[in-house]
Amino acid sequence: QVQVVESGGGLVQAGGSLRLSCAASTTIFRINNMGWYRQAPGKQRVLVALISSAGLTDYAESVKGRFAISRDNAKNTVYLQLNSLKPEDTAVYYCNAQVATGRSSETSYWGQGTQVTVSS
């Protein structure tokens, strides 16, 4: 079993910054893609940013140029730097880790979520 734990959410004014962290607890399995998703009240969970084990990144259009995802493979940790925050960025942010649990299979693990609230 792999545990995924996020931290770093909070309340910030519009234009401010936050840094989210997420650690996946495994010393056995290889972690492939790691990503951040968010879910606003009454809306579906959507992808915010994704990073491969090689460091390739992908972002939702709404956060390009404002958010930056990075990871430390040695620590199985992924970060999300949130800059120039807007009220519409308010959501619960979830970390996801795609873990190679078999020769050709992956298991998806989710964190419990961390609240980000941006006031106007």
Image (cartoon, rainbow, N blue to C red):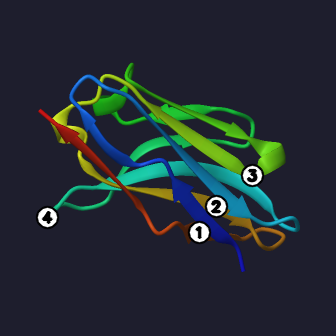
Residue 78 locus on image (x, y percent): 63, 45
Residue hosting label 4: 42
In this view, the residue farthest toward the top is 65
Quadrant location of residue 28?
bottom right
Along the polypeptide, which appears first: circle 2 or circle 1?
2
Along the polypeptide, which appears first: circle 3 or circle 1?
3
Residue hosting label 2: 98
Which image quarter is the N terminus in? bottom right
24 lies left or right of 62: right
Asked whether the beta carbons under mark 2 and mark 3 sit within 8 Å of each other, the answer is no
Quadrant location of residue 4?
bottom right
Under tag 1, what secondary structure?
strand
Q: CA distance from mark 2 to mark 4?
A: 26 Å
Q: Amino acid at mark 2?
A: Gln
Residue 11 locus on image (x, y percent): 29, 44
Residue hosting label 1: 108
Q: Amino acid at mark 3?
A: Asn
Along the polypeptide, which appears first: circle 2 or circle 3?
3
Asked whether the beta carbons under mark 2 and mark 1 sit within 8 Å of each other, the answer is yes
Tell me the tag on residue 76.
Answer: 3
Under tag 4, what secondary structure?
loop
Residue 15 locus on image (x, y percent): 25, 22
Q: CA distance from mark 3 to mark 4?
A: 31 Å
**Residue depth check, mark 2 versus mark 4: number of the one nearer the observer:** 4
- Front-lying residue, 36 or 8: 8
Mark 1: few, some, or many residues within 10 Å (few <14, many ≥20)?
Answer: some
Q: Residue at x 24, y 62 (%)?
A: 44
Which image quarter is the C terminus in? top left
Asked whether the beta carbons under mark 2 and mark 4 sit within 8 Å of each other, the answer is no
Q: CA distance from mark 2 to mark 1?
A: 5 Å
Mark 2: few, some, or many residues within 10 Å (few <14, many ≥20)?
Answer: some
